[in-house]
Image (tube, rainbow, N blue to C red):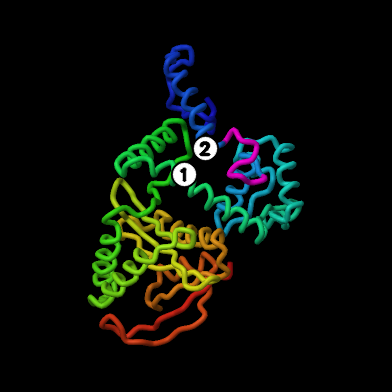
Amino acid sequence: MARGACLPEMMSTPIDAVSAQHIAAVRGFNRFYTQRIGALREHLLDSPFSLTGVRVLYELAHWPAGGDPPTATVLAARLALDEGYLSRILRDFEQRGLLRKQRSVADGRRKSLVLSSRGGREFAQLDARSQREVGALLARLSGPEQTLMVGALQTASRLLGAVPDRLPSYVLRPPRPGDMGWVIHRHGALYAQEYGYDQRFEALVAQIVARFVQRFDPARECCWIAERREEIVGSVFLVRKTKTVAKLRLLLVEPGARGLGIGRRLVDECIRFARAAGYRKLALWTQSELDAARHLYTLAGFQRVSEQPHDSFGKHLVAEIWALAL
């Protein structure tokens, strides 16, 4: 079997030796799951787009930053789509103002595909809707059952030949009882260890968390908990400041989980949620010495808009306000 085929090269069982019961079980799950997630509907997520169209939007929205955006040929190969079929989808996107083409950096004769600002907002709304639907599906399960199911899905993806670097080594989930205490504890412990902040910083975090819980507005606020190997490794909060402005707060990634893209994913989720919720700007408050976090904000398109020296948490600091127009 050629490298890159759908099934992994390590498969050695002849097809005619595969149990009919196993085949029936996989086919049965396919029928069940495609119906459960609404993939059989003509329009996915109550949108004007098909399942394939939404997947194309997803690929364009998640194309790695810093590289040349994909051409139609590259995108068709990535998704194993007929180029003519993809061309019709892209033409529809252009007519709707969701897509723009630009000259490829790698080859000036080709056109790269980039989502327009409108396309980014449209995808953010679809993504938030999908997040809610899957969240509702998982909410029927207990915490251990959710972890078991996600682990089973990751195992199935690995065995069926998913590209390893496309498989997340972590999951993002809503908070559970006890998680807010973890957020407060780990902020207090890590910032004391890495930056020398005293307990007044932990007290500030506790105030922010308490306010979030007591005044939580699910339509306009959210918290994500990053979990890896059944252990919490990160968190972030998106909270309402005004009708048009949201704030990103309490971004944290455990030292042992850094370098996996968790921080950037948490920031991206905040941006998508804020757009879908109708905010016009996303702001945050940080300190000039928090280089890793500031790097993430820069990558996400935030700009520093002000700075102010202050004495807090037992140190002389320079506070910074960063903002992103949505």
Does residue 47 show up magenta in the picture? yes
Q: Residues within 10 Å of mark 1 (few under 14, many from 20)?
A: few
- Magenta residue span: 39-48
Is residue 154 rendered to the left or right of residue 81? left
Kindly identify the amino acid type of the residue bearing the numbered disc 1. Answer: Val
Q: Residue at label 2? A: 37
Residue 83 image point, x, y percent: 71, 38
**Residue 305 falls left or right of residue 149:** right
- Tell me the residue that label 1 is attached to: 134
Marks 1 and 2 close (CB-CB < 8 Å): yes
**In the picture provided, is 169 more to the left or to the right than 78?**
left
Quadrant of the image occupied by residue 81: top right
Residue at mark 1 to residue at mark 2: CA–CA distance: 8 Å
Residue 224 - label: none
Residue at x 65% of width, y 56% of height: 119
- Give SS at disc 2: loop
Residue in front for this viewpoint, 317 or 105: 317
Indicate whether 148 appears above or below 214.
above
